[in-house]
Image (cartoon, rainbow, N blue to C red):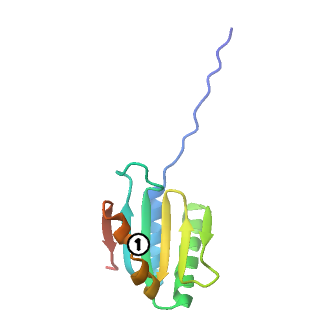
Amino acid sequence: MEKKVIKKSKITDNTAELLEIAIAAALEKKAQNIISLNFSKLKNSICKYFIICNADSTTQVSAISDNIEDKILEKLNEKIWRRNGFENAFWIILDYGDVVIHIFQTEQRNFYRLEDLWADAEIKQHIEI
Protein backbone atom coordinates (compact mmCIF):
# COMPACT_ATOMS: atom_id res chain seq x y z
CA MET A 1 0.00 0.00 0.00
CA GLU A 2 1.37 3.37 -1.03
CA LYS A 3 1.52 6.16 1.52
CA LYS A 4 0.50 9.61 0.48
CA VAL A 5 2.67 12.45 1.63
CA ILE A 6 0.68 15.57 2.26
CA LYS A 7 2.64 18.77 2.31
CA LYS A 8 1.38 21.33 4.74
CA SER A 9 0.92 24.75 3.24
CA LYS A 10 3.07 27.41 4.74
CA ILE A 11 0.91 29.97 6.50
CA THR A 12 2.49 33.38 6.74
CA ASP A 13 1.81 35.33 9.91
CA ASN A 14 1.91 38.95 8.88
CA THR A 15 0.46 40.32 12.13
CA ALA A 16 3.51 42.45 12.98
CA GLU A 17 3.65 43.92 9.49
CA LEU A 18 -0.10 44.61 9.48
CA LEU A 19 0.23 46.35 12.84
CA GLU A 20 3.10 48.50 11.57
CA ILE A 21 1.29 49.46 8.34
CA ALA A 22 -1.93 50.34 10.17
CA ILE A 23 -0.11 52.57 12.65
CA ALA A 24 1.86 54.32 9.89
CA ALA A 25 -1.36 54.87 7.90
CA ALA A 26 -3.09 56.34 10.96
CA LEU A 27 -0.14 58.65 11.63
CA GLU A 28 -0.17 59.72 7.98
CA LYS A 29 -3.72 61.05 8.46
CA LYS A 30 -2.83 62.75 11.77
CA ALA A 31 -4.53 60.30 14.15
CA GLN A 32 -4.02 61.27 17.78
CA ASN A 33 -3.03 59.26 20.85
CA ILE A 34 -2.27 56.05 18.97
CA ILE A 35 -1.72 53.07 21.22
CA SER A 36 -1.50 49.35 20.66
CA LEU A 37 -2.55 46.77 23.20
CA ASN A 38 -0.76 43.43 22.99
CA PHE A 39 -3.02 40.54 24.05
CA SER A 40 -0.78 37.73 22.78
CA LYS A 41 0.32 36.71 26.29
CA LEU A 42 -3.20 36.75 27.71
CA LYS A 43 -5.37 33.66 27.79
CA ASN A 44 -8.70 33.64 25.96
CA SER A 45 -8.13 36.89 24.10
CA ILE A 46 -10.22 37.56 21.01
CA CYS A 47 -7.26 38.81 18.99
CA LYS A 48 -3.54 39.50 19.32
CA TYR A 49 -3.66 43.31 19.15
CA PHE A 50 -5.94 46.30 19.42
CA ILE A 51 -4.94 49.61 17.92
CA ILE A 52 -6.79 52.57 19.39
CA CYS A 53 -6.61 56.15 18.14
CA ASN A 54 -8.81 59.21 17.82
CA ALA A 55 -9.48 62.33 15.76
CA ASP A 56 -11.47 65.50 16.35
CA SER A 57 -14.01 65.15 13.52
CA THR A 58 -16.03 62.42 11.87
CA THR A 59 -14.47 63.40 8.54
CA GLN A 60 -11.00 62.73 9.91
CA VAL A 61 -12.11 59.47 11.57
CA SER A 62 -13.35 58.27 8.17
CA ALA A 63 -10.18 59.44 6.40
CA ILE A 64 -7.97 57.56 8.89
CA SER A 65 -10.04 54.42 8.47
CA ASP A 66 -10.00 54.62 4.66
CA ASN A 67 -6.23 55.17 4.63
CA ILE A 68 -5.60 52.18 6.90
CA GLU A 69 -7.73 49.92 4.70
CA ASP A 70 -6.09 51.21 1.50
CA LYS A 71 -2.51 50.82 2.78
CA ILE A 72 -3.07 47.30 4.15
CA LEU A 73 -4.69 46.19 0.90
CA GLU A 74 -1.94 47.83 -1.17
CA LYS A 75 1.04 46.52 0.82
CA LEU A 76 -0.20 43.15 2.12
CA ASN A 77 -3.11 42.39 -0.22
CA GLU A 78 -5.06 41.71 2.98
CA LYS A 79 -8.79 42.33 2.89
CA ILE A 80 -10.69 43.39 5.95
CA TRP A 81 -12.81 40.74 7.71
CA ARG A 82 -15.41 43.07 9.16
CA ARG A 83 -15.91 46.80 9.47
CA ASN A 84 -18.44 48.78 11.44
CA GLY A 85 -19.30 52.35 12.39
CA PHE A 86 -19.22 54.12 9.04
CA GLU A 87 -22.82 55.31 9.36
CA ASN A 88 -21.92 58.08 11.82
CA ALA A 89 -18.09 57.74 12.09
CA PHE A 90 -18.06 58.30 15.85
CA TRP A 91 -16.31 54.95 16.41
CA ILE A 92 -15.11 52.88 13.46
CA ILE A 93 -13.91 49.32 13.99
CA LEU A 94 -11.72 47.52 11.44
CA ASP A 95 -11.34 43.80 12.11
CA TYR A 96 -8.38 42.03 10.52
CA GLY A 97 -8.64 38.92 12.69
CA ASP A 98 -5.49 39.14 14.80
CA VAL A 99 -5.55 42.95 14.73
CA VAL A 100 -8.66 44.99 15.56
CA ILE A 101 -8.44 48.73 14.98
CA HIS A 102 -10.62 51.24 16.85
CA ILE A 103 -10.79 54.77 15.46
CA PHE A 104 -12.77 57.10 17.72
CA GLN A 105 -13.94 60.64 17.54
CA THR A 106 -12.16 62.24 20.53
CA GLU A 107 -15.31 62.73 22.60
CA GLN A 108 -16.31 59.06 22.26
CA ARG A 109 -12.83 57.83 23.11
CA ASN A 110 -12.82 59.90 26.28
CA PHE A 111 -16.24 58.52 27.19
CA TYR A 112 -15.62 54.80 26.51
CA ARG A 113 -11.96 54.69 27.66
CA LEU A 114 -11.54 51.32 25.98
CA GLU A 115 -7.87 50.99 26.93
CA ASP A 116 -8.79 51.11 30.61
CA LEU A 117 -10.82 47.90 30.20
CA TRP A 118 -7.67 46.01 29.17
CA ALA A 119 -5.26 47.12 31.90
CA ASP A 120 -3.57 43.69 31.95
CA ALA A 121 -2.48 43.99 28.30
CA GLU A 122 0.90 45.37 27.30
CA ILE A 123 0.30 48.95 26.11
CA LYS A 124 2.56 50.80 23.71
CA GLN A 125 2.16 54.42 22.60
CA HIS A 126 3.01 55.31 18.99
CA ILE A 127 4.11 58.81 18.06
CA GLU A 128 5.41 60.29 14.85
CA ILE A 129 9.18 60.71 14.86
Residue 36 in the figure: left or right of residue 89: left
x then y, percent, for residue 49: 43, 61
Q: Residue at x 48, y 84 (%)?
A: 29
Q: Which amino acid does the dot numbered 1 rest on? A: Leu
Secondary structure beneath label 1: helix
Q: Residue at x 51, y 48 (%)?
A: 12
* Residue 1 can be seen, yes or no: yes
Label 1 neighbour load within 10 Å: few <14, some 14-19, many 20+ = some
x then y, percent, for residue 24: 44, 74
Residue 110 in the figure: left or right of residue 12: left
x then y, percent, for residue 46: 48, 55
Q: Quadrant of residue 83?
A: bottom right
Q: Residue at x 54, y 71 (%)?
A: 93
Q: How many marks?
A: 1
Nearer to us in this view, 19 or 56: 56
Residue 92 in the figure: left or right of residue 125: right
Q: Which residue is mark 1?
A: 114
x then y, percent, for residue 97: 54, 57
In this picture, is 10 found above or below 120? above
